[in-house]
Amino acid sequence: MKGLDEKLTVSKTYSINMLIRRFERGEVRRDNPFQRSPIWKQYQKDFLIVTAMHGWKVDPLKICEEVFDDGNSVLWLTDGGNRYTTYHEFRENMFRIGRNVPVPIIKYRSLRRNSEGKPEKDENNNYIYDIIEFNMVGKKYKDLPEELKDRFDNYEVYVDEYYECTSEEVQIHMQRFNIETPMNTIQKATTHMGSAAAWMKNITKDTDCRFFYEFDNYTPNEKRNGTLDRIVAESIMLIYHPDNWKKTQIKVGDYLSESASEEEFKELRTYLDRIYVLENEDFDIVSVFNAKHTFIWLALFAKFTKLGLEDSRFADFIREFKYKELYRKEINGESFESIDGDNRSSKDKRVVFGKLNILESLMMDFLSINKEDIVESFETTDRFDAFATKFENTELMEALGVPMGSDIDRIAAQTLMTVCGKTDFSDKAIQEFITADEYTENNIEDVDLYLDEVNEWSLELPAGTTLLKAKYVPAMVGFVKYTYDNDTNTDALNWFKDYAFQCTKPENDVQKLLNDMKEDFNSYLAYKENKTA
């Protein structure tokens, strides 16, 4: 009998179809008493199936042959039980692919057929194929086109097979397959996050995210042990889901798996990039962004962005906070410093929101802004709600991604206000506009027209263009109205493509961005006229 040291091992590949047949015939068993039961969650199953459909390689399954004293033997599946179970369950139509699976679009070639079902040929008598994009979300195996059923059935599963093992050697192999450094709490939480984990890693693993990687406010160990992941996850919770704040990392992961959106992570990345610019201009403000408090300061910055002020004013406040010792200033009997010294957990809801509320009060006082003028949730009318719902479901807004919470009301109202000729887009003005209910049906129809125009323009731009974000829609609609009012809309598209390419840091204030677009467009028209004169 061969021992472990002689490594009688063979690496093979089986199609999924063949692998399932081997198990069904009893050639391989997966009920070894030392093998744990399947524990994968739905998003893990979804990701594996999509991985197979893309043809991406997965680590090998492990099969061990256990030889008994009487000479008989059995092949055990000793590693990869979750993967095999997932393949089998999907093949048997036991689950659908969930909506949060990454990269759900599968491309394949399909033979073009005419109305009679006969294959079409080109002028050279070659068959014509079309490239089809198929969305896996919501699909079972039975819902796949034949081409993709074949692709799944024939997907090659890598298998390492270990022969002539004793029972003890099988156990040793199983222990060996599962040797790994135990995950810490943050890392375990990441495994609960579903698609949100990939969105998070797009930030924390990107060394071009200079907020995290250029300065020394995060130690090398914090960059390795998942601390950056925790910061991003907690920031998403505090900014976009404050009412559902969770104290423990695992609960944060579970919640984000079900409730977070990719748009939230993308917007957070813009916050990090904007703050990096401030840090790069003044290194003194870096220190407040540490492993303990970064998520709170990011939540504060998110509130700041709704004020329509230059980012430099946020940096001014941080300097005031540090050098004028605002962290010791008491509000309602408590200061940032006193709450920070509380014996409670730093993730306790009272501690987190206590710090954030004090920072917000200090910031608003520093900026001489009445907090009462900032609207967290607008009081709307049935008529406005109908408009906002229609606005939210337009092709443009669905393509750009709809922001969370009251932001959709804010953006919808600002868009309608630009069409109505308004110039004050503060929260107070928005609330007054909604309450007054003075816009006409013609105004709403104009919004529809201008949104369609912006959508047509957006199709001419590459993905990732900075200007293609929901918050810039009001200014873009206002600009389209301007071109229609001045009979220059036929010249606008060529200008817009060049402007959007160069406008990497758009103004956040609606009126300022609209004015900038008008000014740049008029310069373009003047140049064009002089060139043709």
Image (cartoon, grey):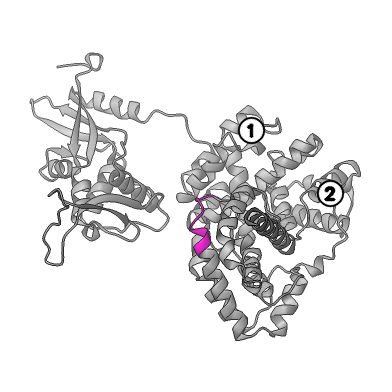
Visible residue check, residue 145? yes
Classify 442 as above or below 73. below
Q: Residue at x 30, y 25 (%)?
A: 172
Is-magenta flag for residue 457? yes
At label 2, which amino acid type do we have?
A: Phe
Classify 223 as above or below 428. above
- In front: 377, or 281? 281
433 displayed left or right of 6: right
Is-magenta flag for residue 453? no
Q: Residue 2: image x %, image y %?
A: 17, 16
324 displayed left or right of 414: right
At label 1, which amino acid type do we have?
A: Tyr
User: Most prominent secondary structure in the magenta stretch?
Assistant: loop
Visible residue check, residue 468? no
Kindly identify which residue carries mark 2. Answer: 317
Q: Residue 149: image x %, image y %?
A: 20, 52
Kindly identify which residue carries mark 1. Answer: 213
For label 2, the SS is helix
Question: Bounds of the magenta span?
Answer: 456-464
